[in-house]
Amino acid sequence: MALLTKRILGMTLLAASLGMGAMKADDTRRATFNLPVKAYWGDVLLSPGQYTMWIPVATHWPQVVALSAHGKTVFVLAGIESAEPQSKGSYLELSKVNGSYVIDEFSSGISGKLFKVQKPKVVRN
């Protein structure tokens, strides 16, 4: 039974990685921001610096966000999605939890989507 579970998990991870490689970015929806402190987006720790962010074109759930900085690109889960009125502005909301900064939410004004980001295990405990 454990072997079957490992195989299913392995096939799922392989399919997910192939799917991410096939996604193409929508260049009209790129944004840049400067992160002044180290902050967690879910379980991913982001270093301070200038970031380019975009939401890759996807036809499946969960939605991911691509973040590029320091010559590297990471894909993070966007979070729990809800609708909000469209606006011209977008933002990231940070808070400090147990001495670490975490990104609580990401609002995409152009798409009218609000993403609530789960706090990482390392700061919840």
Image: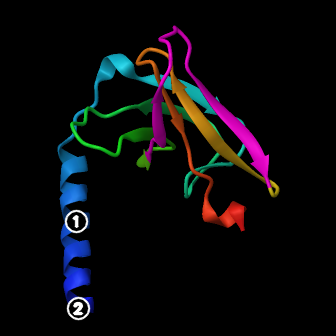
Crowding around mark 2 (Cα neighbors within 10 Å: few <14, some 14 to 19, many 20+) is few
Residue 29 in the image: state x and y as whole percent: 37, 20
Q: Quadrant of the C terminus?
A: bottom right
Find residue 64 and report its horizontal and vertical position in percent: 38, 42
Q: For the magenta stretch, what is the residue range?
A: 77-97
Label whose residue precedes the other's in the sequence (1 or 2)? 2
Identity of the residue furthest to the top in this view: 88
Of badges 1 and 2, nearer the viewer stands 2
Q: CA distance from mark 1 to mark 2?
A: 17 Å
Residue topped by disc 2 = 1
| Residue found at x 22% / y 40% | 23
Residue at 41 percent of width and 23 percent of height: 30
Disc 1 element: helix
The answer to which quarter of the image holds residue 48 is top right
Q: Is residue 3 above or below residue 88?
A: below
Q: In the rendered structure, find residue 36 and report the number of the disc placed on it.
A: none
Q: Which residue is mark 1?
A: 12
> Amino acid type of disc 2?
Met
Render colour scheme: rainbow
**For residue 59, above or below residue 32:** below
